[in-house]
Amino acid sequence: MIIFDIMALMFALWASYAIRLSIWTPAITSERLLLAALAPVVAIPVFIRLGLYRSVIRYLPEAAIWTIIKAMLIATMSWVIIIFLMEMAGQGIVPRSVPFLYFILGTLLIGGMRFAAKWVLVSGTGLRRDEEPIFIYGAGPAAAQLARALKGHGNRYVMGLIDDDPANHGRDLGGYRVFSSNDLSSLIDRYGIKEIVLSMSSIPVTRRQAVLSRVTGLGIKIRSLPDISDLVDGRYIVSQIREIEIDELLGRSFVPADNELLDQALTGKTVMVTGAGGSIGSELCRLIVRRKPKKLILFEASEYSLYRIEQELLAAGDYPIVPVLGSVTDPKTVERAIRTHGVQVLYHAAAHKHVPLVEANVLEGIRNNVFGTLTVATIALEQKIESFVLISSDKAVRPTNVMGATKRWAELIVRQMAIEAHSKSEKQVFCAVRFGNVIGSNGSVVPLFKQQIAKGGPVTVTDPDMTRYFMAIPEAAELIVQAGALSVGGDVFLLDMGEPVRIGDLAENMIRLAGFHVRDSKNPDNGIAIEVIGKRPGEKLFEELFYDRNNARPTRHPKIMRADSTGIARYDIAAWLQDIEQAILAGDEVQAKKLLFALITAEDPPEQAIAHG
């Protein structure tokens, strides 16, 4: 660059004389040669001082032109001073217009070279072999900024912008042609598009669901960039481009968390989470530490899971965290953890949740889910814990599998503890929060589908007409905490899961989001197939959140409902538990399973509220 600048300045000086004298070959004198040599000698140190050689040409900002003008102006003025001194010494006269022409030509050459080089480096001469042609969906300022950020970065080449507004069609935005969204299919074929990036800031909220539905069936990869307000300093960062997550297709409305409820439940409290290393437990821990608790007790049976969540939380900040390795079925360990640390709030998330595995291991499932809950809830009652929240499941409603039955038993146990606390006039709250599947949790169908798609398929579904409720893990954790803050004791809270999702549709959408076609009778030669393997033991075709939806009552939070709870005082829970325990000790799986379902089958009539004094 220095060599080029020296040559450019010499050429600018020669051209200045040529223009002024109207002759291509001005006479060469010793004075002119000296002045020609002094021009770069004066200019280069100025350029160095003003940072013209520190800039990376590829990322040279437009504002750099002002630095170049300033540098040339200082260099020219310095050169004029030398001319003046030479004239004073009688060393010849330089025409007065030459310095002015030298400044103009030098600025054009020095600045023009840099910006021309930037254009070549960033744009090249067109689409390179290693670049994939893409469209950006959206035609607002955010989309234009994203297109500029992508130019020359990585292997994406922006072919144009897609927009729904007819007023923008055919126009150029930031040098990119805006196309109609109605022509997407033909445009993809014409330009060989491999990917569409959704600039979510450019797409109105009311249109996003329709846009997602439109682009997912095109057989190409769909990715998105978060709202510009979500990124640091409002700048687009290309690494923030991500795959569309399946929860964005579920159409769930988002309700901001009630900070008052979160603070009421957590701030300044000593909180304990059982199953702290699991999907729900770990997300609860992440939420809890952000609300500044007095102390957080991580209770977990898996050494690796406990280590992983502890290290994650410690890396995120200096939080008061105490890891406790132990099982919820061990009363001494549970009692010591609660008593030693003075636990005030307890979230009981520890459970075996995988339906087929629990179905194949009935005794362990009952021991952990039923008697583990009994152990923790009993000790919580004895230690006068302020709030106990059980993490339940939609499978607890009219259960057909062991996992669901154990969760219903856990609900009954927690409600029984609420009755006992109420009878003793203790200011203790026991409640349960019931919801469906969380996307991405351990054992969830979504990670399984992703793995199968990554391997090229087939995607296995038990029954395409099976429906399930889905919710994002962070949203579930926030609602669990808020539900606990709303409890008056003995409540079973139901989280609004939206509309149930058909598993067959879920599989098809995930295949399309990955950029593949679904292989079926209409498309037998390419794509990823969906294979139906039949229902597994204990699986229901559809899940329910309510015994009777008409009995659900709203709360102050629009996403949380309160189920009318069954008055179970007439049932001798202790006697039933004793019989089940005897069956477990005897290793009688058949009898244990029979007893497990016997009470909850009899208890099936609609839930009615516990009376509070």
Image (cartoon, grey):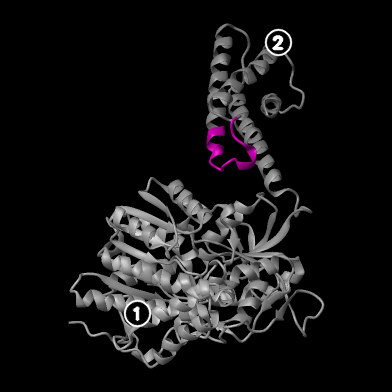
Q: Position of residue 425 (x, y in %)?
A: 18, 74
Let me know if residue 63 is in the magenta part.
Answer: yes
**Extreme residue in the top direction:** 89
Badge 1 element: helix
Residue type pointed to by label 2: Ser
Image x and y of residue 201, in percent: 50, 64
Graded by Cα atoms within 10 Å as few (under 14), some (14 to 19) or many (20 or more), the crowding at tag 2 reads few
Which mark's residue is nearer the viewer, 1 or 2?
A: 1
Give above or below for 379 relative to 435.
above
For the residues bearing labels 1 and 2, Cβ distance under 8 angstroms: no
Q: Would residue 256 be seen by someone viewing this image from the given angle?
A: no
At horizontal 74% and vertical 26% (from top left) the residue drawn is 23
Residue 344 lies within the magenta run: no
Q: Is residue 171 left or right of residue 425?
A: right
Q: Which mark is residue 30?
A: 2
Magenta range: 54-68
Q: Which amino acid does label 1 sit on?
A: Ala
Q: Please report the residue visible at 70 percent of the width from the left and 43 percent of the height from the top.
A: 121
The residue shown at (26%, 85%) is: 610
Give the side of residue 246 with respect to residue 580, left or right.
Answer: right
The front one of 6 and 504 is 504
Where residue 218 sits in the image (x, y, percent)? 69, 74
Give the residue pinned by disc 1. Answer: 574
Q: In this view, does 5 lie to the left or right of 199?
A: right
Quick one: label 1 or label 2, which is nearer the N terminus? 2
Which of these two is toward me, 603 or 315?
A: 603
Q: Residue 475: x percent and y percent?
A: 43, 68
Quadrant where the N terminus sits is top right
Where the C terminus falls, by quadrant? bottom left
Is residue 361 in sight in this rendering? yes
